[in-house]
Amino acid sequence: MEKIHQQVFEYDQIVIGGGLNALLYAYLNDCPCIFACADPPFRFDDFAEDYDFRSLGVTTSSKLELWERLIRVLGLSGLLPMADKTASITINKNILKAVTHVSRLGRFEFEKLIIFDDEKVSGLPFIKSRIELPAKVIDWFNVRSGMEHPLDAIDTDDHFINRVYFYPSDRLDGAKGKRIRKDLVAVSYLEPDQLNNFDYSPTMARFKIIQMMKDAGIRGARNGRDTYNPKLYRYYSPKIESAQREIVRDIKNYYEPDERFEFRYDTAEEIIKNFPEELESYSSRLARRL
């Protein structure tokens, strides 16, 4: 039996990309999908509209849950021929070579590539223009004082600290009995020139979030009783410390025309608009049975 690096697999179309939009397109069009960079959605990203993904076994609005389900369904359907092992992709004429992290090689002959993500892909046409949109900046904080409160999120109209999510702590036993102790993560949308500006640093994010927590009525640990009314307690301000910052850049490259390639810039929501009520592909039948 030939090993994968000794074979050339033939497909009419191959989808390139590891994001939710690419996986949805591959599922809807019954195409294989290859990616060098898995791109799962942010943990707390939900669809704004009430989409029906029950046929895929997903009953929530979580984008991450849908992404994970599609990975499973496409994998079991044979539509992720390289799984998550690809380190780089090279294109020469109508042959795609996918190299794994341990230097194994998969060869694929194609008529057209549907490209959602060009990261770590070589052999593409010349770039004629490039647009860099605001980056999504994700700041994770450990809460040291002020972990117990009823809030799940705080929203603002600002690009810097646009939303703060509170979630049961992964560091601790976040839920113990009736006590739920929460850490937090903040999402900002920053221009490229703001990313290295101290005014938008994790330090400044910390100051702003603490003030937001205080304004929302979140208090830190007790600080004794009130001097003038012993029946009341005084409280310290909330305390948080920066744990990690993630920067997700949004760079769109626009290429010279080439009939071998179709570059797609659709969001997951835009692809879902073409989501048929009934699919009869092997992967859709498999999804209904899982």
Image (tube, rainbow, N blue to C red):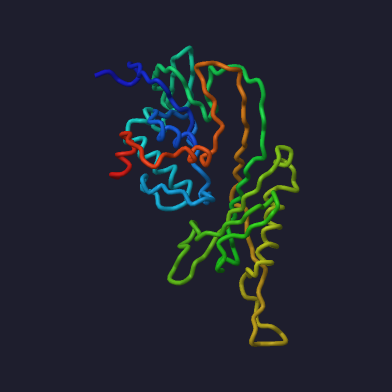
Choose top left, top right, bottom left or bottom right for residue 248: top right
- The residue positioned 67% from the left and 68% from the top of the image is 237
- The residue positioned 41% from the left and 47% from the top of the image is 53
Along the viewing direction, whichever of 223 and 19 lies nearer the viewer: 19
Along the viewing direction, whichever of 243 and 6 lies nearer the viewer: 6
Measuring from the top left, give residue 114's x and y in whole percent.
Answer: 48, 25
In this rendering, would 68 be left or right of 287?
right
Query: Residue lying farthest front?
Result: 277
> Where, quadrant-wise, is the C terminus in this rendering?
top left
User: How many marks are shown on the rendered structure?
Assistant: 0
Q: Is residue 132 above or below residue 58?
A: above
> Where, quadrant-wise, is the N terminus in this rendering?
top left
In this rendering, would 100 be left or right of 226?
left
Query: Residue lying farthest top?
Result: 93
Q: Is residue 154 above or below residue 191?
A: below
Q: Is residue 280 above or below residue 149?
A: above
Along the viewing direction, whichever of 158 and 217 lies nearer the viewer: 158
Choose top left, top right, bottom left or bottom right for residue 66: top left
- The residue positioned 39% from the left and 49% from the top of the image is 58
In this rendering, would 162 be left or right of 34?
right
Along the viewing direction, whichever of 245 and 74 lies nearer the viewer: 74
Measuring from the top left, give residue 82's x and y in whole percent.
Answer: 39, 28
Measuring from the top left, give residue 98's x and y in whole percent.
Answer: 43, 22
